[in-house]
Image (cartoon, helix red, strand yellow):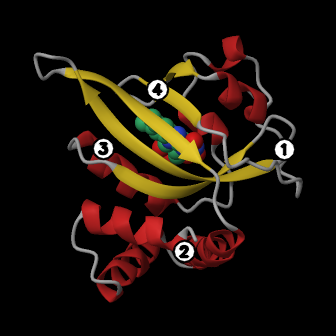
Amino acid sequence: MTKPQPNETEHIVKNVDLIVSKSDAEGNITYVNPIFVKISGYSQASLLEQPHSILRHPDMPKVIFEYLWKNIKEGKDVVAYVKNLCADGGYYWVLATVKMAKNPDGSFRNYMSTRRCITQEAKDQISQFYKELLDVEKEQSYEASYEMFENFLTKHNIYDNQAFNTYMKSLNK
Ligand SMILES: Cc1cc2nc3c(=O)[nH]c(=O)nc-3n(C[C@H](O)[C@H](O)[C@H](O)COP(=O)(O)O)c2cc1C
């Protein structure tokens, strides 16, 4: 699927919207709910079996997804702000909770993401932080942006995923 050229059109996620998707172990989409389909601008059929990265917006720093995958692979939930790209090149911001679901026998079942709207204050704060991470990633290196992310965690006394999740939720006011 060819990616659209990003533009400045923001698609607003409403208070009541809960944007849900599920994936296999590689992050390929196995389920999307109707609001996911609507806001993405893609048809349900064209989304299924595609990698979630079709939503990746170029403003998202790589380190956020590295952090996400490292944790969810270990069965740890991650709450993170995500700016997603729509089929028309527009974007939307969400606070996503991504977790692994297991079968009754303990084996891997799927990953699931539930995404909710975020406040303007959270948007302003996080877009600035992500811009700083992305600038360092592009102008220096991925390693430098990783270090910057780690310094951010240390500065806010974030030593595990629960503390990270609590901190991210606290910004959404
Ligand atoms: C359940 C689940 C949901 C995801 N949702 C998104 C999403 O909404 N937007 C996004 O850019 N990446 C999402 N990802 C992360 C992608 O798998 C991928 O790591 C990310 O888009 C960066 O892709 P890239 O490194 O191939 O560019 C999700 C992953 C999982 C497992």
Distance from disc 1 to disc 2, alpha carbons, whole Å, reads 22 Å
Question: Residue 110: image x %, image y %?
Answer: 34, 24
* Residue 89, label in figure: 1
Residue drawn at x 61%, y 59% as measured from the top left: 60
Q: Amino acid at mark 3?
A: Ile
Residue drawn at x 41%, y 75% as measured from the top left: 149
Question: Residue 135: image x %, image y %?
Answer: 62, 76
Q: Residues within 10 Å of mark 1 (few under 14, many from 20)?
A: some
Q: Nearer the viewer, residue 16 or 113?
A: 16
Distance from disc 2 to disc 3, alpha carbons, whole Å, reads 21 Å
Distance from disc 4 to disc 3, alpha carbons, whole Å, reads 13 Å
Please give the residue where the numbered disc 2 appears in the rendered image: 133
Q: Residues within 10 Å of mark 4 (few under 14, many from 20)?
A: many
Please give the residue where the numbered disc 3 appears in the rendered image: 72
Please give the residue where the numbered disc 4 appears in the rendered image: 22
Q: Is mark 3 within 8 Å of ligand 1?
A: yes
Q: Amino acid at mark 4?
A: Lys
Label 1 with label 4: CB-CB less than 8 Å: no
Residue drawn at x 53%, y 78% as measured from the top left: 140
**Circle 1 SS class:** loop
Label 1 with label 2: CB-CB less than 8 Å: no
Question: Residue 156: image x %, image y %?
Answer: 34, 84
Residue drawn at x 41%, y 43% as measured from the top left: 98
